Image (spheres, grey):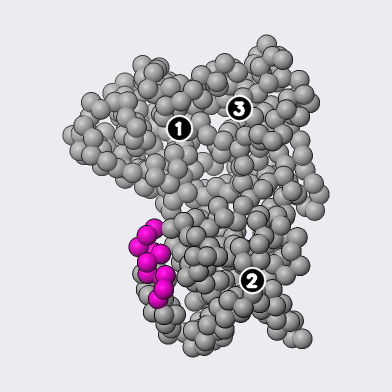
Amino acid sequence: MQQLSNEVYTRKTAVVERIVQFGTGNFLRAFVDWLIHEANLQQQQDLGIVIVQSTSGSTSEVINAQDGLYTLVTQGIQNGQQVNYEQVIESVSRSISLQNQYEEYMKLAVSEDLQYVVSNTTEAGIVYEQLPFDAQPSTNFVANVTHFLWKRYETFGADPSKGLIFLPCELIEQNGTALKNGIVSYANAWDLGQSFIDWVTGANTFCNTLVDRIVPGFPKSQYEELTLKLGYEDKLLVAAEPYYIWVIENEEALHSFPLVNNQFEVKLVDDLSYYRERKVKMLNGAHSALTPLAILLDTDTVGQVMEHSKLRPFVQRLLVQEVIPTINGDKEQLMTYQQAILERFENPFIAHYVKSIALNALAKFKTRNIPSLLAYYKQYATLPKHLTTALAAWIYLYQTPEVFSPQDAPEAIEQIKGKPLADVLSNENLWGIDLTTIPQLEQFVGEAITAFKESQTAQFIAELEEEALGL
């Protein structure tokens, strides 16, 4: 069977290389590249993407062997209906290996057609490291972008029309600002001059963004079946859920961005902190809260949690009664988002193992759940018992190695293992606050831990639900 390429697939659109993409991974191909593909089809756009691979590996070669084509499989539940379909994505023009094709990379830097830069180099990608100017190509993303812009500046001078719009997708706060600051740091360290710095900060636009879509990646278990169905081999096959949203802090330069219209869930906002809070507290927070109880009840995946008679109501009530009230925003929209979260958790095509969520669980709980717990108590002067139960479950698991083996920083484990409950709860390094200052919290956590020890987890959760229902 032939491999997917222009020989076996006829393109519907012609593209011009207007976008540079740093990152060959599944997420960008199933998110940004798919959105660009849809814009090209629906709006007769010609946006083409050049993918830059800065790491070692053969992905760049595979992309070029397939003429930039690959298949996206969209699978999940949307508006109560199961979704499962395939489409060939045509927005990628080619790929450049930074390590092997640095001259091509520098040629790309001076292209008259370029408009946008997207990236997903993981949370550790946007960092400044001390490097000499001639250390190129580098494994540092920010250094490589600085060289890219310096080449463009050398060629076009301070021409403001040659600036680019940066849309980083790394999951860190203020990702665009962090990237801009890193570039300025290299410009200063390498003595590239104030004129260059002024051009970087004045002619280029660095947007802060928030992205959200679950992308499981290569559907290995379905590969043979899909290959027979599609009639070709595709080494870049990627699967994603139907849900997505891309929130971008409002920049005047983006008002003509083809994705900013009613056809796409791409939102321009003045401040994306609400969307970040919503995602962290609700989506990520629900994950962190359900995981310890799922482990205690021998439930392996998030999908199984949604089928569990005790855990599903627990998750839903936690979101509706304890988390949503702590978020300033339209409650109807938050309820709609809550429904979308439950549909995403129910996705029958994704086996999202709770033990993968359990990695570095204490730091996650501190960031995702403690703010909701504190805000709820401040607002109602009573304990949010579902959130507090999840807290108790994590403490119990970390103190019971025969039940659970934590994958966390050694210092975090040592601060909780074998320690008296009062010491654990009062440890501000763990939670950011002395939790013993909250009335009744220590007593409630102690009662929950006793129930876990006595294998009464399901009964404890059931009693919570009865209390919430006023039974």
Residue density around tag 2, few if under 14, some if 14–19, many if 20 or more, within 10 Å: many
Q: Residue 4: image x %, image y %?
A: 66, 18
Q: Quadrant of residue 434?
A: bottom left
Q: Nearer the viewer, residue 186 or 443?
A: 443
| Magenta segment | 409-419
> Callout 3, which amino acid?
Leu
Q: Residue 299: image x %, image y %?
A: 67, 60
> Callout 2, which amino acid?
Leu
Q: Which mark is residue 236?
A: 3
Which residue is pictured at 52% across the width and 72% down the height?
396
Which residue is pictured at 60% across the width and 18% down the height?
66
Q: Which numbered mark, 1 or 2, is in the foreground of this view?
A: 2
- Residue 420 part of the magenta-drawn span: no
Q: Residue 42: image x %, image y %?
A: 70, 32
Q: What distance separates the C-alpha of mark 3 from that of mark 1?
A: 17 Å
Which residue is pictured at 52% across the width and 50% down the height?
210
* Circles 3 and 2: CB atoms closer than 8 Å: no
Label 3 or label 1, whichever comes before in sequence order: 1
Q: What distance separates the C-alpha of mark 1 from that of mark 2?
A: 38 Å
Which residue is pictured at 36% across the width and 16% down the height?
103
User: Where is mark 1, residue-wise?
Assistant: 22
Q: Secondary structure at mark 1?
A: strand
